[in-house]
Amino acid sequence: MTATVSLLTDFGPGSAYVGQMHAVLRRLAPDARVVDLAHDCPAGHVEAAAYILRRSAPHFPEGTIHVVVVDPGVGTSRAVLAARTEDAYFIGPDNGVLAEAAADAEVRRIESRALMAVEIAPTFHGRDIMAPVAARLALGMDLAEVGPRAEPLRVPPQRDLEAGGVTGRVLLADHFGNLVTNIPFELLAQVGGPGGAVRVRIGAAFIDGLVETFADVAPGRALAYIGSGGNLEIAVNEGSAAEALGLGVDTEIRVEPGSR
């Protein structure tokens, strides 16, 4: 069966760096299907990349090899890891980016020099280490060949209720200007209690209650809703929340119980 390799980076759409990773994969594993999951992850934003990976990986075919190059520590002593779950493989830096999607996986440090490029650029481990290893896994190499076992990945602590609410931040501003936060639906349900009513504060804006669709509010109005990834999102009907509210990645957001 033809293997699938997914690429998630912060290189930017149309980047030559993405093309170079494709070239390595094409040269070493020409029959592999390469899927560009996303290349517009906020630069160096490990939490945003971890969110995208966790929400996207379940939709891929079994055995997909997910390569994540969001790596602000590239070239330092941080390890490069390869992990295997029952359904997929994951390759990326040891900075937490794999922790949520590959929790409880078999994890190994990529140390076999024979699997890497002849020359390794200190600032491009995605091309020179991760892509070659992904290609070999796509060809059927056993994970044990990459190197020794590493400590199991630890999922970062989840957000908690605090003083009658929860405080989070914006992870992503998508193409439409919708603001994706790091507050999951499960936590919102706890904030709202049995009635489910919440009040959202983001920047200078206050939004009372959650809606299901953009059309539930008038054009130009801001709304809060649970996005397709399961987290709280902020949007403007027929507009851009990022532009209308003047907000973006890492903006703080506070959710408290609303009036019923």
Image (cartoon, rainbow, N blue to C red):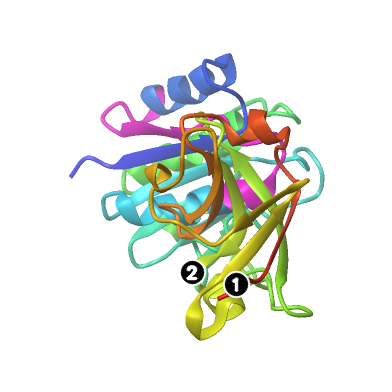
Real-space Cα distance between discs 2 and 1? 7 Å
Depth check, front residue: 116 or 185: 185
The N terminus lies in quadrant: top left
80 part of magenta stretch: no
Q: Secondary structure at mark 2?
A: loop
- Amino acid type, callout 1: Pro
The C terminus lies in quadrant: bottom right
Q: Secondary structure at mark 1?
A: loop
Dot 2 corresponds to which residue? 105
Q: Is residue 126 above or below residue 101?
A: above
Q: Is residue 171 at all visible to an observer of this figure?
A: yes
Q: Position of residue 137 (x, y in %)?
A: 39, 46
- Amino acid type, callout 2: Ala
**Res. 121 image quadrant:** top right
Q: Residue at x 69, y 77 (%)?
A: 160
44 part of magenta stretch: yes
Q: Position of residue 146 (x, y in %)?
A: 53, 52
**Res. 27 image quadrant:** top left
Residue 152 is tagged as 1
Compared across the picture, whether 164 is left or right of 191 comes to right
- Write the start and end of the magenta stretch as one range: 27-50
Q: Is residue 95 at all visible to an observer of this figure?
A: no
Compared across the picture, whether 218 is left or right of 62 comes to right
Q: Is residue 122 above or below residue 204?
A: above
Depth check, front residue: 127 or 117: 127
Depth check, front residue: 55 or 165: 165
Q: Position of residue 171 (x, y in %)?
A: 64, 47
Q: Residue at x 41, y 50 (%)?
A: 56
